[in-house]
Image (cartoon, grey):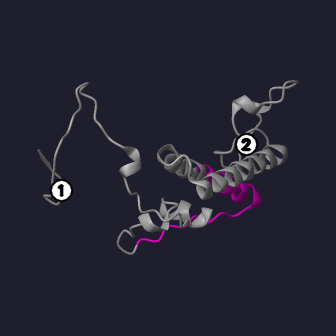
Amino acid sequence: MYFDESNNYFDDYKNETNDYDININSIEFNRGNILFSKEEGFNKGNLYQNLYSKYKNHVYKLNVSNKKDELLLKIQMYTFALKDLILYLDIKPTDQSILKEYTITKETLKELKEKYEKEYGPLCNTNVEDDKWTWINNPWPWDKGGK
C-alpha cells in the first residue's frame, strides 16, 4: 500500500514473476498531441501544451547576436524537440501524428547540422572530413571567438 504526495492511495500489485504488471495501453497520457513550436517548446522545456505548467511568472528566451549562434540555437531546439518526441513514441509507438512530426523534425535537424558544418565546421569530432583533421580548427561551437 502506497500514498502519493497528495495522500492518494494506490496499491502495489506484482504478478507471480515479481515483475510489475503494467498494461501500457491502459495508461491515458492526455497529451492531445497539441505541440508548441520548436522554439516555444525549447524555451518552456516541454513540447506538449497539455503537459506544460508555468513556473511562477518565469519567461525564458535566449537571444543570439549572429547567424552562427542563431543556427546553433536552432540545432539545439530541434534536438530537444526530437528527444521529447522520442520519449512520447517510446510509450505510444503507433501515434501517426507524432510519427509524422518525428520524421519532419529529424530531417530538419539533419539539414540544419549539414548547413552548420558546411559553413562553420564540424559540430563534433565524428563529423570530421576524411582528408584532414578539421576538428582542431578554432573557434569550436562553444568557444567565444577561439584562441
Label 2: element kind? loop
Amino acid found under the numbered disc labelled 2: Pro
Q: Neighbour class for label 2 at 10 Å: few (<14), some, many (≥20)?
A: some
Where is residue 123, by image quadrant? top right
Q: Residue at x 38, y 67 (%)?
A: 53
Is residue 133 rendered magenta in the image?
no
Q: Please provide percent x and percent y for residue 104.
A: 71, 54
Answer with mark 2 or mark 1, whichever residue precedes in sequence: 1
Amino acid found under the numbered disc labelled 1: Glu
Q: Nearer the viewer, mark 2 or mark 1?
A: 1
- The span picked out in magenta is 58-79
Closer-to-camera residue (110/129): 110
Label 1: element kind? loop
Instruction: Kindly identify which residue carries mark 1.
Output: 5
Q: Residue at x 41, y 48 (%)?
A: 25
Q: Neighbour class for label 1 at 10 Å: few (<14), some, many (≥20)?
A: few
Instruction: Kindly identify which residue carries mark 2.
Output: 139
Task: Give the left or right position of residue 72, taking residue 24 as reference.
Answer: right
